[in-house]
Image: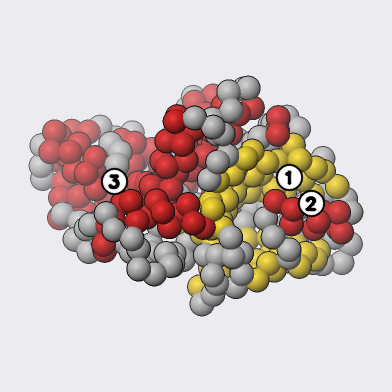
Amino acid sequence: MLTTTAPRPLQAHALFQSTDLDEARERVAAVFCPHRLETLGRGARLNARQHHLRGERLSLNYIEYGAKALIAPGELDRFYLVQIPLAGGAMISNGGAAYYSSPRRAAVLNPHRPTTMIWDEGCAQLLIQIDREAMMDHLSAQLGARADRMLTFDGPLDLTSGAGAAVRRLALYLATEADAGRAPLGQGLMARQVESALMSGLLDSGAHDHAAHLGRARSAPRPRHLRLAESFIEANLRRPLTIEEVAEAAGISARALQLAFRQWRGTTPLGWWRDRRLDAAHADLMAGKTTVTDTALAWGFAHFGRFSESYRARFGIPPSETLRAARGGYQD
């Protein structure tokens, strides 16, 4: 979980902090909906907090409970909820879908399906609450006709690449802007466009029952040269790489390689290589058996400040916070 040395998102919009279970349940319910809230495990110590920034059609929220917690709201009814873990993770059940949400995979909760969650001890999440009718209106606008059934998402949202990574970056950026006194949500054309961008990103990145109608070509296989390039990069994560040698391994020109990664991965070949190394570093830190310095060096990051900056941009927290959480969680 985040510490006082690393300001929590939306810190300037703190709603409450409490160690009382009933108060925490009531305060969170006032923003979202009535729900069951219980701490799990002997000696569990609740230290809940919520930060809240209200917009016109959606809100941004930061929530942590400190202790391992069971949260069972049933059907959310009025809103969709995107939960982006910044530290720790949560087991999610939403209708027939059950999965583990982590800093690599956000949970997308449908309003018309019952939800039960177990948040890990030390879990901290940034949440995007989207009004149900606003989401359906936005979907209809993208379809060019009124949606004939409720939008239903299926499973987690990949935060590591493509539109899912863009949604995460945008949400964190909006939180940063809000804390700097430049509230990006509220009234006005720009605020409405920001909200639309978040909803469009969710439609672009999430697996859902209207994806085919939005014209996304999800079934096309990766080109052979892209598979070769990715395999070469994965096999050489720990050593320096150049565009030219990746292109040679893929059997295409450097220019063609750049275009392929832009089209299929939304990044550059070296950007994709960097992200894979960051993912590997994140896995090592989550194991809790290393140091930040050793991890950075092991995965080819000799500039520690740049490593920390890139890690925070990808996972929302500095590497030291991941390691601290892995070794026993947050101490307020």
The residue wearing badge 3 is: 265
- State the image coordinates of residue 44 (x, y, percent, origin top left): 85, 60
Query: CB of mark 1 within 8 Å of CB of mark 2?
Result: yes
What residue sits 66% from the left and 35% below the top?
A: 10
Q: How crowded is mark 1: few (under 14 residues within 10 Å), some or many (20 or more)?
A: many
Query: Which numbered circle lies on residue 50?
Result: 1
- State the image coordinates of residue 332 (x, y, percent, origin top left): 82, 40
Q: Which of marks 1 and 2 is nearer the N terminus?
A: 2
Q: Earlier in the sequence, mark 3 or mark 1?
A: 1
Q: Residues within 10 Å of mark 2 (few under 14, many from 20)?
A: some
Q: What residue type is labelled 2?
A: Arg
The residue wearing badge 2 is: 27
Q: What residue type is labelled 3?
A: Arg
The span from disc 3 to disc 1 (Cα, nearest Å) is 34 Å
**93, above or below 87, in the image:** below
- State the image coordinates of residue 245 (x, y, percent, origin top left): 19, 37
The span from disc 3 to disc 2 (Cα, nearest Å) is 40 Å
